[in-house]
Image (cartoon, rainbow, N blue to C red):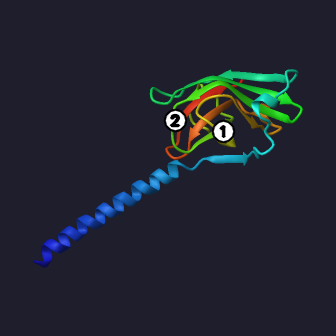
Amino acid sequence: MSKPVSKYLKYILVAAVLIGLVIIIFAARNITETVETVDQSSAPKPAAIANDSQVLRKGVFSNADAVHSGSGTASVIQTNQGLVIKFENFKVTAGPDLLVYLTKNNFENTKSPGEFVSLGKLKSTSGEQVYALPDNASEYASIIVWCRAFSVSFTGAVLR
């Protein structure tokens, strides 16, 4: 009777090792390179942006794939309070752990964030919102909404 028990024990150990490998691979896939995180406590409210503020670049949100979609515009604006990005007429598919990244990757060519600056958690899946930007924002090509939990892009806009 001891042989069948040891046989099952071997199967259980092999299964445990395989599950462990899957977990390690999934965790490694979620590792991304954050250049910095921008403090959002000083970001003005959308209504507080003056009409004379200068729009430097603009982009239109597009779908990441058939499941993850977004729409609206993103405008990089020089305000009296500093450099910000404003989402207007914004809407994105809801999901867990959604973050806003300013990325050096061109969203049209890749859905991966690559080298990025985290602007923090997405404030809302719809409506106007404003995020403070770092002074070197001109070095970044796109703004994306990234699901950290599943390492997938939900929407993005190339800033031109």
Give the numbered dot on residue 75: none
- To which quarter of the image does residue 157 belong? top right
Q: Secondary structure at mark 1?
A: strand
Q: Residue at x 14, y 78 (%)?
A: 2
Residue positioned 57% across, 50% down in the render: 31
Q: Earlier in the sequence, mark 1 or mark 2?
A: 2
Vertical comparison of 151 with 25: above or below = above
Residue lying farthest front?
Answer: 47
Judged left or right of residue 110, residue 66 is left
* Amino acid type at image mark 2: Ala
Residue 159 x %, y %: 71, 25
Q: Going by the image, does 36 lie left or right of 155? A: right
Please report the residue visible at 46 percent of the width from the left and 57 percent of the height from the top: 24
- Crowding near the residue tagged with mark 2, few <14, some 14–19, many ≥20 C-alpha atoms within 10 Å: some
Would you name the residue on which mark 2 appears? Answer: 94
Q: Picture coordinates of residue 92 (x, y %)?
A: 56, 30
Residue holding disc 1: 101
Residue at 77 percent of width and 27 percent of height: 76
Q: Nearer the viewer, residue 70 or 117?
A: 70
